[in-house]
Amino acid sequence: MALGEFELISRYFERPTRRAVLGVGDDCALLAPAPGMQLATSVDMLVEGRHFLSTVPADRLGHKSLTVNLSDLAACGAKPIAFTLALSLPAADEKFLEGFARGLFALADRHGCELIGGDTTRGPLTICIGIFGEVPPGMALLRSGAQAGDQLWVSGRLGDARLALEVFRGSLQLPGDQFEQVRPAMELPQPRVELGIALRGIASSAIDVSDGLLGDLGHILHASKVGAVVEADSLPASEVLQLQPTALRHLCTLTGGDDYELLFTAPAAAAEAVRTAAAASGVAVTAIGRIEAASGLRIVDGAGKSIDERHASFDHFRSG
């Protein structure tokens, strides 16, 4: 007998709630943030063929689907509380659902974030998650607080997800062991929730790197009405990416996207506080530039020479 919609929900996605007042099973869920806290919320949609490959293992897809939203909370400095899941499926494939739910809930449990509702329907594979977190009033990290003289920081490493994507696309070849080293960056990115919380009161602005470092930095610069200098050779990259030609390495680290690291600014005097917060969160951070009063974005190499024009010649590689 084919798996029905409500049996599907009951078997794979219905779990008892601990924090929500009311979870799956009614027309609405009920949330009650801790006294004195503000509610932070975000929503993202992932479409097969556009945001993920059809070949990705189901458990990894479940993990990444929630990572995208947890990363938004991290960029706000918010603690996760709960999420909703709307799932469009071509068919009620039990093997897929078991793996997807396993990956989804493993990450959710790690961050104390519970599923409180959603919807399912038949259609092209599409995943839409809405997430809720809490943050003390006035402590949320925003895009609009960067000031001239601030240092520019990024967590973790950049570019491996884009490098893996190019292998999947067939435009690049890597030895098997190197590919397996960078593939998790694309399929199992780790949201920097603990770091975002630790940066409350230290970072002056923040955003997560989902669309590429330069594109996401542009949002901070626009919101804060400032400019920046980015030191391309300071961008943290894996050993595999460092083996690639300089132009390809710069392309992946500057515009690759899908990194889900935190890009943030902080006063220069707060550098030690930044490093302490990062160490407490178990995440490496790297200073990659500075904020300037004059508008615009400059990309320089290790010698301080502009590489903007050379980098722009790779726009054709970014398409698609």
Image (cartoon, grey):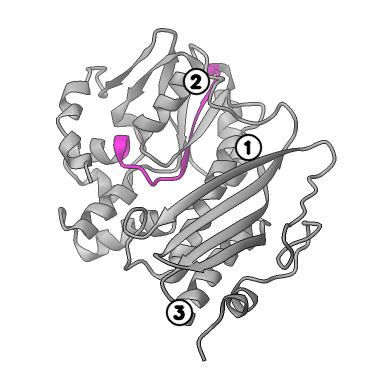
Regarding residue 312, the answer to whether it shows in the image is yes
* Apparent side of residue 183 relative to residue 243 in the rendered image (left or right): right
Q: Is residue 196 magenta?
A: no
Q: Secondary structure at mark 2?
A: helix
Q: Secondary structure at mark 1?
A: loop
Q: Is residue 134 above or below residue 292?
A: below
Across and down, in percent, residue 146 comes to 52, 19
**Disc nearest the viewer among 2 and 3:** 3
**First along the sequence among labels 2 and 3:** 3
Mark 1 sits on what residue? 77
Query: Bounds of the magenta span?
Result: 253-268
- Identify residue type, mark 2: Ala
Label 2 close to label 3 by CB (< 8 Å):
no
Q: Is residue 52 above or below residue 252?
A: below
**First along the sequence among labels 1 and 2:** 1
Disc 2 crowd, CA 10 A, few/some/many (<14, 14-19, 20+) = some
Q: Residue at x 39, y 56 (%)?
A: 47
Across and down, in percent, residue 169 comes to 20, 57
Across and down, in percent, residue 218 comes to 40, 25
Mark 3 sits on what residue? 93
Across and down, in percent, residue 100 comes to 49, 70
Regarding residue 307, the answer to whether it shows in the image is no
Mark 2 sits on what residue? 223
- Identify residue type, mark 3: Asp
**First along the sequence among labels 3 and 1:** 1
* Apparent side of residue 2 relative to residue 303 in the rendered image (left or right): right
Q: Residue at x 47, y 57 (%)?
A: 64
